[in-house]
Image (cartoon, grey):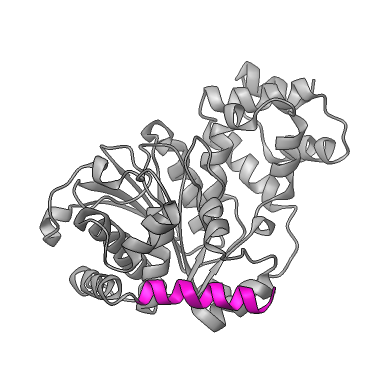
Amino acid sequence: MHEAVTMLLQRERPVEAPVWRSFWDRLREGGLRRGESVALLASLATRMPDRTTLTGLLDSLAGYRSADVPAEVGTAVNIVGTGGGPRTFNISTAAAFVAAAMGVRVVKTGSRAWTGGLGSVDLLERLGVPLTASYEQTHASLEAHGIAFAGAFVYPAELGLLARSVLPLDIRRLGGFVNALGPFLARLPARAQLTGVADRRLLTGLRHAAGHLARGEVRSVWLCANEAGADELLSFLPNRVYACEGALEDEFVLDPARLGLRPGSPDELRPRDGDPVARFHEVLSGQGTPVAEETVALNAAALAVAGQVTGDWGAALDAAREVIRDGRGLGLLSRLRSGAAAHA
């Protein structure tokens, strides 16, 4: 059994970057048995790795990347959740469209559904919005539309190899921690990243991952969590935000009541039965429920503030509400879809 797996199972000493690199090399060469991959994933899912092990994991994967990222991509912001939590409609994807229509440059990462419903990639597929396949395409979409949805190329190829190495077992039952770590593994230098954390037991490790990211390619990383266990900011409950700005860390409570937002409940954010695309159109066109629209507006406003487009929460919220009311987010979606059809 590979040393990385043995060390994770025994928990006697941390797994440092050289051992992780050896594991990835063996995986790439096809030299791992399925049981080794399963044991590694099960160990990571069972117990949060220590800081040294987590740093080694992040550093080892970063070492395999060589593609240059256009500097212009680094002026954008990203919103992405760790998955899990109560079922909701695709809040972060809606917030990305609204923020972009406000004038905030957005490059969004995401994934397919992990535990049910529609992930951002599933929804975009149904909407007819393609993912970019390279940094050049990402830059081009940013220049044309102010928004881009990055494809799997931004993630380490080793993650896909690891998932395939456990087949026919279901990676979704084994890879929970790796999925939660996904927002911090994408190579997408950005001005800021807003990441919701559903499982607050992971916050200690993910705060370390966020700090690691903020000291590297992304200048500002905000982690948010709330009592409802949603992986987005909610407009009706206090949200605790952990902000990493380079080597500096801060913590604050974003209380929607202080911003004048109305009460509500998670039930008002659940996906309705029927067509999820129609539901998404409703929210972007100002025909959604008040709580749904205010939650999207709050997340869009947070992208503007975290990305230092503005420091005024009230003005950012007003701008987001206006975009939703006049349907500019829906218009942006239509332009993206029309552009994709023209190039098909």
Can residue 129 be seen at all in this image of the molecule? yes
228 left or right, relative to 124: left
| Residue at position x 69%, y 40% in the image | 17
Observer-nearest of 303 and 279: 279
Q: In the rendered picture of this protein, how many numbered marks are placed on residues?
A: 0
Q: Please state the horizontal and vertical placement of residue 42, each as a whole percent of the image.
A: 61, 23
Q: Which residues are magenta?
A: 328-344
The secondary structure that dominates the magenta segment is helix
Q: Nearer the viewer, residue 87 or 185?
A: 87
For the point 20% across and 46% down, which residue is it? 237
Q: Is residue 245 visible?
A: no
Residue in front for this viewpoint, 138 or 280? 280
Residue at position x 51%, y 29% from top? 48
| Outermost residue, top side | 10
Q: Residue furthest bottom?
A: 144
Q: Position of residue 232 (x, y in %)?
A: 35, 49
Residue 260 at x, y percent in the picture = 11, 60
Displayed quadrant of residue 129: bottom right
- Residue 209 painted magenta: no
Question: Would you say residue 333 sits in the magenta stretch?
Answer: yes
Q: Is residue 75 above or below residue 250?
A: below
Image quarter in which the N terminus is found: top right
Residue shown at 53% from the left, 74% from the top: 336
Q: Is residue 147 left or right of residue 131?
A: left
Q: Quadrant of the C terminus?
A: bottom right
Q: Is residue 319 above or below residue 291?
A: below
Which sits in the foreground, 278 or 132?
278
Residue 87, image quadrant:
top left
- Apparent side of residue 229 relative to residue 108 in the rendered image (left or right): left
Vertically, is 271 above or below 190? above
